[in-house]
Amino acid sequence: MSLKSNNKIETNKYELEVAVDGAAFEAAVEKAYLKNRKNIRVQGFRPGKAPRKMVEKMYGEGVFYEDAVNALVPDSVPAAIEEAGLKLVARPDIDVVSVDKNDGVVFKVTCITKPEVSVSDYKGIEAVRNVKEVTDEDVDNQINSVRERNGRTITVEGRAAQNGDTVVFDFEGFKDGVPFDGGKADNYELKLGSGQFIPGFEDQVVGKNVDEAFEVNVTFPEEYAMPELAGQPAVFKCLIHEIKAVELPEVDDEFVKDVSEFETVDEYKADIKAKLTERAEKAADAEVENAVFDAVVAKLEAEIPQVMFDSKVDDFVADFEQRLSYQGLNLEMYLQYTGSDMAKFRESFKEQAEKNVKLRLALEKIAELENITATDEDIDAEVNKMAEMYKMSAEDVKAAISTEMLAEDIKIRKASDFVKDNAKIA
């Protein structure tokens, strides 16, 4: 293999011309013949025994060229890229320029490379750490959530429906006085205030009583799924059969014993407050980290290839699809359920993908500028942590992963710690 030329044709885009000489090409052709001859039938020869020249005479001199050229790519192209000193961020595009039995093969290899970046003023980034104060109301709200989970449903008598109640009712929808498909149900259960029905519907059920016939006047949203109803006014005739509410348990020592490991209300409240305070501290730390990292991204200067953003979106989509599989779903089903499509779905990851790519490039540069490295001890510690997590031996973990990539991740983590440690937090 020889690298004949290395030309920069755009920012972060190079075109290489790579040549493989005639001898190497001949060896690849011979290897392709040996690999395929068992499947070749030539009259007068046993299967797999026909001489190469006879096969080429029968099927054409270039019968094995495609296989030979494909076999040359995995060694010659990476070697040329390494010789050119390029760091790629996507698979190269490879075109065959010429194939000749004497002169060999010439490839044109188009490469998208990692961008040159600069980042400055990353020390002393200022950020404000705001820790939300945990109030008695916050504690009470937490306890009320537990009460709701432990409440019992009762039938309400002697009063009208209220927000939070569940009504069992019949309804039928009319447009211009004519019933429409899908607008009728009997003994339907609707929790008022849940937002399950179109805007304005549930509000008009509030205040109505059992056995009371009434009408609900609404207008369907412009983006409603059924085009014939979108943006149209409608009237629903309704009749309530039952009103149900959740009866919450009293907050006393017996309730506390049932829902926690504590004996008294005071102990339970103190524990909730401590946990909410810890959560508030972590939330404040996360906000500071995001602010610091946003500042780092803002200080990055680079012309980043679009393929890097697209690749990160691919990662997000693949991760989401894997999590769906744990629930017995696939991405196609999810998009149907949510009324979305792949273009909109990918667009939802665009902003986060751009931030992630930019932040990593900035942290890589900071690691370089600050001579941050991943030591053998760092790598061993990370491998041991993974081994414990996945119940594997350290040797098996090392065999399954790229320690080089692991080292890069450790450097990124150290660089992020460096930036946060050097930030000025008020």
Image (cartoon, rainbow, N blue to C red):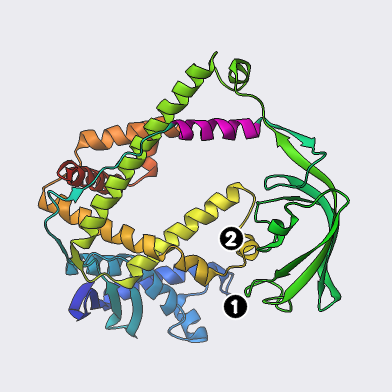
- Mark 1 Cα-neighbour bin, 10 Å: few <14, some 14–19, many ≥20: few
Q: Looking at the image, which is closer to me, 227 or 59?
A: 227
Label 2 residue SS: helix
Residue 88 figure quarter: bottom left
Q: Earlier along the polypeptide chain: callout 2 or callout 1?
A: 1
State the image coordinates of residue 186 (x, y, percent, origin top left): 87, 56
Task: Give the residue at mark 1.
Answer: 44
Which residues fall within the magenta stretch? 136-149
Task: Give the residue at mark 2.
Answer: 331
Q: Is residue 245 above or below residue 303?
A: above
Label 1 residue SS: loop
Please state which amino acid type lies under the numbered disc 2: Leu
Taken as a whole, is the magenta stretch helix, strand or loop?
helix
Give the Cα distance between marks 2 and 1: 55 Å
Q: Is residue 37 visible to the viewer in this orientation of the structure? A: no
Q: Is residue 190 inside the magenta stretch? A: no
Residue 247 figure quarter: top right
